[in-house]
Image (cartoon, helix red, strand yellow):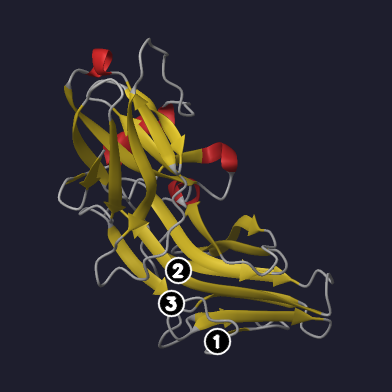
Amino acid sequence: MRTIHTHAIRALSACLWAVGCIAVLSGCIEPWEGPPHFLHVEGIAFVPEANQGEPTSRIEEVWVYSETDVLGAFPLPADIPLNPAELGESTTLTLSAGIRANAISSTRQPYPFYDAVEVPLSLEYGGRDTLAMEVGYTDWTEVVIAEDFETANRFEPAVTSTADIVRTQSEQWVLDGTSSGLIVLDAEHQVLISSTNEQQYNLQSNGPVWLELDYACTQPFWVGLYVKNAVNAQRIPILVLNSTEGERNKIYLDLDPVVRTTPDATHYEITLDAYYDGSADSTTVIVDNFKLLRYP
């Protein structure tokens, strides 16, 4: 059994993302006679550059491509069966990291901002390789650290809010680094309507536009965009995130539908809204590591 390391063999993933989104696959390959060659991928590590924020990810699948076909999408950890008769004794596969878009199981796809990895293999019936796979953001990705709460809090509540999002350094609440954003809701603080304050994000793009964030919550909350043009402004809730029962989670939110339908926007802000649901005497929402990603 051989172990293959990937940090020196990355390839751009945008084209594979487009192909993967068209194909509706779930790791199924036509059967053949004889023992296959297996490629084992235990997991996929995300390794960003120094200025690209915390190395958090939620990579759940590996998408596998031969030189001519999409071979399938395999839940991690994965044992990928390969047919030497079809692929040849010497072949190169391309692997992409798969995520759940908008936290929905039915929208699994390769993430358009992660590198794809090219893996040269020598195949034999009954053979086995293990791949130590790492990905980073593609060279074309523009990463904006919208908020990590380390030095400031860019979220500001509306005048109608009775609750607030505060920067906390309490170890009980911090997800990463020294600080996170904390929302506490109760009978006296029932409504949070907030947005980043005058950050004026440019999200127009010739390609995909996404938001990443980490969170833990004991009740639902909304994430969206505040859209401003030369005439007026519009607040657009995009997705409600349900309770994680206080457990940490990460989401990849596709902003493209909103951005594409607001071509006259001059800039955008990120919105966070929450309404006390009464499920406990007090409920909490913790957020961190807001990243905006696009291809300029």
**First in residue order: circle 2 vs circle 3:** 3
Instruction: Say which of 193 and 265 sits in front.
Output: 193
Secondary structure under the numbered disc 3 in the rendered image: loop
Rendered view: 239 above or below 90: below
Rendered view: 284 above or below 172: above
Amino acid type at mark 3: Asp
Left or right position of 7 against 137: left
Few, some or many C-alpha atoms within 10 Å of disc 1 (few <14, some 14-19, many ≥20)? few
Label 3 near label 2: C-beta < 8 Å?
A: yes
Residue beneath label 2, please?
A: 290
The residue mark sitting in front, 1 or 2, is 1
Q: For the point 15% across and 51% down, which residue is it?
A: 8
Left or right position of 106 against 246: left
Left or right position of 231 against 4: right
Residue beneath label 3, please?
A: 148
Estimate the x, y position of residue 147 in percent, counting from the top left.
Answer: 43, 75
Q: For the point 28% across and 20% down, which residue is it?
A: 125
The quadrant of the rendering that contains the N terminus is: top left
Q: Quadrant of the rendered structure where residue 282 is?
A: bottom right
Left or right position of 177 against 64: right
- Residue 228 is at least partly visible in this image: no
Q: For the point 55% across and 87% down, which residue is it?
A: 171
The residue mark sitting in front, 3 or 1, is 1
Few, some or many C-alpha atoms within 10 Å of disc 3 (few <14, some 14-19, many ≥20)? many
Secondary structure under the numbered disc 1 in the rendered image: loop
Rendered view: 75 above or below 210: above
In the rendered structure, find residue 60 and report the number of the disc placed on it. Answer: none
Residue beneath label 1, please?
A: 171
